[in-house]
Amino acid sequence: AQSVTQLGSHVSVSEGALVLLRCNYSSSVPPYLFWYVQYPNQGLQLLLKYTSAATLVKGINGFEAEFKKSETSFHLTKPSAHMSDAAEYFCAVSGLSGTASKLTFGTGTRLQVTL
Amino acid sequence: DAGVIQSPRHEVTEMGQEVTLRCKPISGHNSLFWYRQTMMRGLELLIYFNNNVPIDDSGMPEDRFSAKMPNASFSTLKIQPSEPRDSAVYFCASSSPGQGRAGANVLTFGAGSRLTVL
């Protein structure tokens, strides 16, 4: 079975500060890992994904994540937070086998950006 | 591309009533997923279809829930009878075959249907 754990249900940063959202995964096979963002009253949108190519993955809106096998981590970062980044962020894992992207999501981290 | 379209966006009903949620996936996408989001349980996969065939319904909570995909452009999630604990946001998502392994394909989510059962 595969799973992801997101540390911290709420993270608050000042505008312009570094954003770090933590995600650790558990998988018996090499995983595919994703970060999705959910703005209020909207569905989830893909930020970035790791599919065993480069370990440092760049996504939209200045976000990036680094796959670290030794730490079983896939933390999401952004050098400088913007007010528009306030949203809920979900880490998700999908396995190599199977016929479709059956994603298992973490519990989410709500990012608050303050002035 | 209009994206994944879900209806209704909001539904308020009374306990015991039948609820039908609808989803139109993106044209050309061959996989469709139904997720449920609640504060207590987060995002849960209820069922997914591949080429209109249900592949995994292990997440469907109980027999009161059923899902169908009669064709590539339409799916329904039905709850009968509904109960207050079914109150949640229900998301439909779809994905395309893509170029690589299926597990790497990206899901595109609809805006969700917010269900309130009184």
Image (tube, coloured by chain):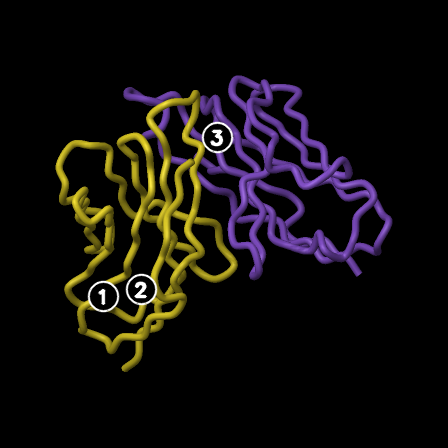
Task: Answer above or below: position of B109 versus B117.
Answer: above
Determine contact: label 2, label 3, CB under 8 Å: no
User: Residue B50's x, y, as percent?
Assistant: 51, 21
Q: Tell me what residue is drawn at x 83 percent, y 44 percent.
A: B81
Give the distance between the C-alpha atoms of the residues marked 2 and 1, in whole angstroms.
Answer: 10 Å
Q: From the viewer's perspective, is the residue at label 3 or at label 1 nearer?
A: 1
Letter of the chain shown purple in the rendering: B
**Are callouts 2 and 1 both on one chain?**
yes
Determine contact: label 3, label 1, CB under 8 Å: no
Q: Chain of mark 2?
A: A
Count of marks, rendered view: 3
Letter of the chain shown yellow in the rendering: A
The one of A52 and B75 positioned closer to us in this rendering = A52
Q: From the viewer's perspective, is the residue at label 2 or at label 3 nearer?
A: 2
Look at mark 2 in the image and give the residue it sits on: A85
Look at mark 1 in the image and give the residue it sits on: A19
Q: Which element type, helix, strand or loop, lies under badge 2? A: helix
Amino acid, disc 1: Val
**Are callouts 3 and 1 both on one chain?**
no
- At label 1, counting other C-alpha atoms closer than 10 Å, the crowd grade (few under 14, some 14-19, many 20 or more) is many
- Sequence-wise, the earlier of marks 2 and 1 is 1
Q: Tell me what residue is drawn at x 58 percent, y 19 percent.
A: B52
Amino acid, disc 2: Asp
